[in-house]
Image (spheres, rainbow, N blue to C red):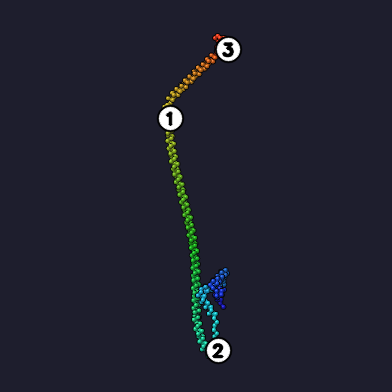
Amino acid sequence: MAKTLYQLLNIPESANDQQIHRAFKDIERHGLKREDDSAIDTLNRAREAFVILSDSSRRIAYDRKLAASRLQPTEIIPPTAIDRSQAGPWLQRLAIALLLLFPIGSWLYHNNQQSQRQAELEQIQNAKLIAATEALKSQQEQLLHDNQQISAQRQDEQAARRMEMELRLRQQQMDDTKMLSQQQLQNQTRSLDLMEKHLNTDTRDQEQYIAERQAELQYKKPAMAMALQEQQDQHLALQRQRSLRQHDENIASINSLRAARLKAYDRDHGSGGISTSNPAVDP
């Protein structure tokens, strides 16, 4: 006997939506761990049961179908054993039962067909949803990959721009340094030129001054010689005067010393007369 949907999920027929959902999650968890054919088959059947039982309208239809399948069939009495007196009421009852069972059977049949169609549609929708999810996932991965490539390209472009800016800045610095060096060289050249001009001017001035001094010396040389001769004559005259004055002073001092000796001699000898000897001359 085939298992019912409730038996596939291991839940009672009075289970609520939370119990159905919890039972399916347990079966799905165990089936994903095993990963064999029987586990996959059990998981697929449990998924179909969950899809039907989680929908209230489909669950009601399935419960009616399950209740109809559990009805006991009516015992059919052979025509030979039926009393002819009871044949008419029995046929009427059979016809009434058939008339009552035909709408129920047709309803169950149509409901089963509709359930199958809905199940097929849901499977198709689930397959489409899975395919769309996979496509969306692949698109997201592709988009992430593209974003990574774009970000890498942007980073490369930013690095290239940064390097280009650094090169331009270095080139500008080198140009500024070169320009500054050229300006300094020009300034130094101008300074050297000015110094050379000043030196040339000073040299010419000095040469002109020297020439003027030489010409002046050449012009003043006789006068200077005469002045020098006069100075020498004056110096000689001064020396002569000094010598004469010194001689006079020496003679005066000698005379005074002689006089002092005469007085001393006269005083010592006491003769009172004039001395014939010269004390200044005699030793």
Task: Tell us which disc is closer to us: 3 or 1.
Answer: 3
Task: Tell us which disc is closer to us: 2 or 3.
Answer: 3
Classify mark 2: helix, strand or loop.
helix
Q: CA distance from mark 2 to mark 1?
A: 182 Å
Q: Please provide percent x and percent y for residue 121.
A: 49, 73
- Residue at 51%, 76% (x, y): give it: 60
Q: CA distance from mark 3 to mark 1?
A: 76 Å
Query: The N terminus is located in which quarter?
Result: bottom right
Res 49 label: none
Mark 1 residue type? Arg
Is tag 2's residue or tag 3's residue first in the polypeptide sequence? 2
Is tag 2's residue or tag 1's residue first in the polypeptide sequence? 2
Residue on which disc 2 sits: 81
How many residues crowd mark 3 within 10 Å: few (<14), some (14–19), many (20+)? few
Query: The C terminus is located in which quarter?
Result: top right
Relative to 32, say whether 91 is above or below: below
Label 2 with label 3: CB-CB less than 8 Å: no
Closer to the camera in the image, 82 or 225: 82
How many residues crowd mark 1 within 10 Å: few (<14), some (14–19), many (20+)? few
Closer to the camera in the image, 90 or 275: 275
How many residues crowd mark 2 within 10 Å: few (<14), some (14–19), many (20+)? few
Residue on which disc 1 sits: 213
Mark 2 residue type? Ala
Classify mark 1: helix, strand or loop.
helix
Is tag 3's residue or tag 1's residue first in the polypeptide sequence? 1
Q: Is residue 177 visible to us here?
A: yes
- In this view, the residue farthest toward the bottom is 85
- Residue at 49%, 83% (x, y): give it: 99
Residue on which disc 3 sits: 268
Q: How many marks?
A: 3
Mark 3 residue type? Asp
Relative to 216, say whether 24 is above or below: below
